[in-house]
C-alpha cells in the first residue's frame, strides 16, 4: 500500500489521528516524531540505565496535517493503494481468547498464507493497575499509584475513591461461608473471568451493537451474573479449585505464547547473552517464530484462554546489574 499510494503507514496513521481530533480540537505540534521498534530494546535500556549513555534510536518525523480536509485526502490516498478490499477480515482475532461463538479457523483471509502468518502478532500488556479489591468487601480505585509521586501530596494531581458497599451477598472464602459486598465481589469476579477468558467478547460493532445493562448509566441496575457457572468458578479465590484453574490457565497460555512467538520476558533467558541467541534475528519482535504449519498454529492459538500468563521471575536473573542494586539513572521511581 505504501508503494502504490506514495503514503507511508505512519503518515496515514497521523492523518487518521488528525481526523479524530476534528476541527475543534487543538494540537500544537507541526511535526510528530515516531520512534521505530528496537529488537534489543531491553538490553539497550539496561545499558542506558547503568551507564547513563543513551543508545541510538530510529525516529521518523511526520508532518501533522493542517486541516481535516488534508488529513482525509491523505487517508483516502493511502487506502487507494490497496490491491483488494479486506472488509471481511477482522482487525483482531483476540476475541477468540474469550467465550466467542466463532473460532479462529472461521476467520476470513484474502491474501497469501505467508501474509496471514505475518499478521499474527503477540504483544506484552503493560499492567498499570488502578484498582485494589480487598477481601471482596472494599474497593480502592482511581489514578493514584502506590509510589512517592502519587502519594506524597505535592506531586501529581491524583484522585481515588474508596467504595464500601452495604449491599451484601452470600459468597465463599477459603471454603467457608462468607458475606461479601456486592460491588467489590462482582467487580473482582468479572475481572478474574476476563483474565481467564470466561466472558463473551465485547466487539466494537460497526452496525447496531446490542445494548446491555452494563452500558446503561445509574440508576439502571446491571443484570446479575451471580450463580452462573463462570461466576461460581471464580467465587472463592482461595479455594483449591480456583487456584488450579488460575495456575493451569497461566501456565498453558505462557507455554503456547513461548512456543509460537518466542515471547520475552521468559524463564529460559537468564542473561543478555542468552537473550541475543534466543530470538531469531530474521523475525520481527512479536511475530510468529516457528516453522509449524498455519493450521497447527491456529489450533494451538485456539487453546489460549483469556490473557493470563505465568510471571517469568527468572528472566535475566544471572545479569548482575539487574539483581545487585545498580543505580538506574533516570529510571528510579520518583
Image: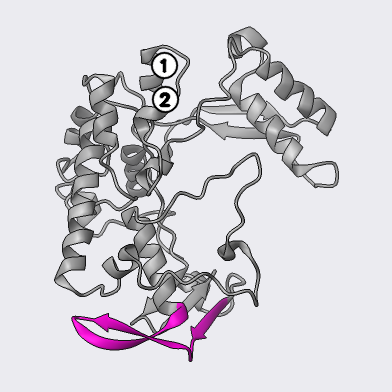
Q: Is residue 24 above or below residue 222?
A: above
The residue range painted magenta reads: 160-183
Nearest the viewer among 99 and 130 is: 99
Magenta part, dominant SS: strand
Q: Is residue 332 above or below residue 20?
A: below
Q: Position of residue 29 (x, y in %)?
A: 74, 39
Per the image, label 1 sits on a secondary structure element best described as helix
Res. 237 image quadrant? bottom left
**81 magenta-colored:** no
Give the residue displayed 42% in from the left and 25% down from the top.
119
Q: Position of residue 20 (x, y in %)?
A: 73, 41
Per the image, label 2 sits on a secondary structure element best described as helix
**Residue 11 makes an appearance in the image:** yes
| Residue at mark 1 | 115
In-image side of 124 versus 322 (left or right): right
In-image side of 51 versus 128 (left or right): left
* Classed neighbour count for the residue bearing mark 2: other residues with Cα under 10 Å, few (<14), some (14–19), many (≥20): few
Nearest the viewer among 144 and 176 is: 176
Q: CA distance from mark 2 to mark 1?
A: 6 Å
Return the mark for residue 39: none
**178 magenta-colored:** yes
Give the residue displayed 42% in from the left and 28% down from the top.
107
* Classed neighbour count for the residue bearing mark 1: other residues with Cα under 10 Å, few (<14), some (14–19), many (≥20): few
Q: Position of residue 270 (x, y in %)?
A: 15, 43
Return the mark for residue 119: 2
Amino acid at each position: 500500500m505504501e508503494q502504490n499510494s506514495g503514503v507511508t503507514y505512519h503518515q496515514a496513521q497521523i492523518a487518521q489521528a488528525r481526523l479524530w481530533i476534528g476541527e475543534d480540537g487543538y494540537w500544537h505540534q507541526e511535526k510528530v516524531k515516531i520512534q521505530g521498534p528496537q529488537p534489543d530494546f531491553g538490553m539497550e535500556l539496561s545499558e542506558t540505565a547503568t551507564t547513563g549513555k543513551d543508545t541510538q534510536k530510529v525516529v521518523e518525523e511526520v508532518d501533522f496535517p493542517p486541516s481535516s480536509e488534508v488529513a482525509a485526502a491523505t487517508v483516502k490516498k493511502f487506502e487507494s493503494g490497496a490491491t483488494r478490499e479486506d472488509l471481511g477480515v477482522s482487525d483482531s482475532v483476540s476475541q477468540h481468547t474469550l467465550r466467542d461463538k466463532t473460532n479462529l479457523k472461521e476467520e476470513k483471509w484474502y491474501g497469501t498464507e505467508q501474509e496471514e502468518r505475518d499478521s499474527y502478532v503477540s504483544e506484552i500488556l503493560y499492567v498499570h493497575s488502578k484498582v485494589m479489591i480487598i477481601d471482596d468487601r472494599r474497593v480502592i480505585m482511581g489514578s493514584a499509584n502506590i509510589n512517592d509521586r502519587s502519594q506524597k501530596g505535592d506531586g501529581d494531581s491524583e484522585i481515588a475513591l474508596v467504595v464500601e458497599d452495604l449491599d451484601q451477598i452470600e459468597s465463599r472464602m477459603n471454603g467457608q461461608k462468607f458475606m461479601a459486598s456486592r460491588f467489590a465481589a462482582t467487580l473482582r469476579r468479572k475481572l478474574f473471568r476476563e483474565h481467564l477468558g470466561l466472558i463473551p467478547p465485547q466487539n466494537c460493532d460497526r452496525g447496531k451493537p446490542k445494548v446491555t445493562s452494563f452500558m446503561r448509566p445509574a440508576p439502571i441496575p446491571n443484570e446479575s451474573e451471580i450463580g452462573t457457572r463462570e461466576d461460581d468458578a471464580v467465587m472463592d479465590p482461595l479455594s483449591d479449585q480456583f487456584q488450579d484453574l488460575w495456575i493451569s490457565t497461566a501456565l498453558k497460555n505462557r507455554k503456547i505464547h513461548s512456543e509460537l512467538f518466542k515471547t520475552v520476558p521468559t524463564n529460559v533467558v537468564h542473561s543478555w547473552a542468552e537473550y541475543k541467541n534466543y530470538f531469531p534475528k530474521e523475525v520481527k519482535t512479536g511475530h510468529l517464530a516457528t516453522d509449524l504449519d498455519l493450521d497447527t498454529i491456529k489450533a494451538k492459538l485456539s487453546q489460549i484462554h483469556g490473557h493470563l500468563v505465568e510471571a517469568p521471575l527468572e528472566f535475566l536473573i544471572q545479569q548482575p546489574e539487574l539483581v545487585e542494586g545498580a543505580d538506574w539513572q533516570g529510571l528510579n521511581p520518583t
